[in-house]
């Protein structure tokens, strides 16, 4: 019984370890691949009035909530709710078709 339990725990550990994906998510791997820090971010204001960083490189889009140093949402009023503002489509030669 102990051997079965040990084998089961070992198999479970291997299965969980396989979930660790060590892909660098700061790099765009498309045909115009580049480090994401070279793209320009804009601000999209959600329906609650809080800011989110937004980047559009033509094929893919990136979005993350804008937070202050304490981890609280930033609600700056940079634009009306539901509106994106700033140079978020700059930094890539790929033209967005929308």
Image (tube, helix red, strand yellow):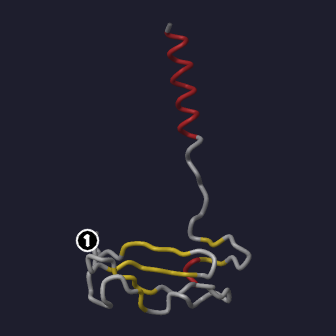
Depicted 25 relative to depicted 85: above or below: above
Depicted 43 relative to depicted 65: above or below: below
Q: Residue at x 41, y 91 (%)?
A: 85
Q: Residue furthest top?
A: 1
Q: Residue furthest right?
A: 31
- Residue situated in front as seen by the camera: 34 or 94: 94
Depicted 79 relative to depicted 45: above or below: below
Residue 39 in the image: state x and y as whole percent. 56, 84
Q: Residue at x 65, y 88 (%)?
A: 95
| Residue, disc 1 | 72
Q: Residue at x 61, y 77 (%)?
A: 35
Count of number-bearing discs: 1
Q: Quadrant of residue 68?
A: bottom left
Relative side of 46 to 86, left or right: left
Q: Residue furthest front?
A: 98
Residue 14 in the image: state x and y as whole percent. 58, 33
Query: Label 1's element?
Result: loop
Q: Residues within 10 Å of mark 1 (few under 14, many from 20)?
A: few
Quarter the C terminus occupies = bottom right
Residue 26 in the image: state x and y as whole percent. 56, 70
- Residue situated in front as seen by the camera: 69 or 19: 19
Q: Residue at x 68, y 70 (%)?
A: 29
Q: Quadrant of residue 7?
A: top right
Residue 20 in the image: state x and y as whole percent. 56, 47
Depicted 10 relative to depicted 78: above or below: above
């Amino acid at each position: 019984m102990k051997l079965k339990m040990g084998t089961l725990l070992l198999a479970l550990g291997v299965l969980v370890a396989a979930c660790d994906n060590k892909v660098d998510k700061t790099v765009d791997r498309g045909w115009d691949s580049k480090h994401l820090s070279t793209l320009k971010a804009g601000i999209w204001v959600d329906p609650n009035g809080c800011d989110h960083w937004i980047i559009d490189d033509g094929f893919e889009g990136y979005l993350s909530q804008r937070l202050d140093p304490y981890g609280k949402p930033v609600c700056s009023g940079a634009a009306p709710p539901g509106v994106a503002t700033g140079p978020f489509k700059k930094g890539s030669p790929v033209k967005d078709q929308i």
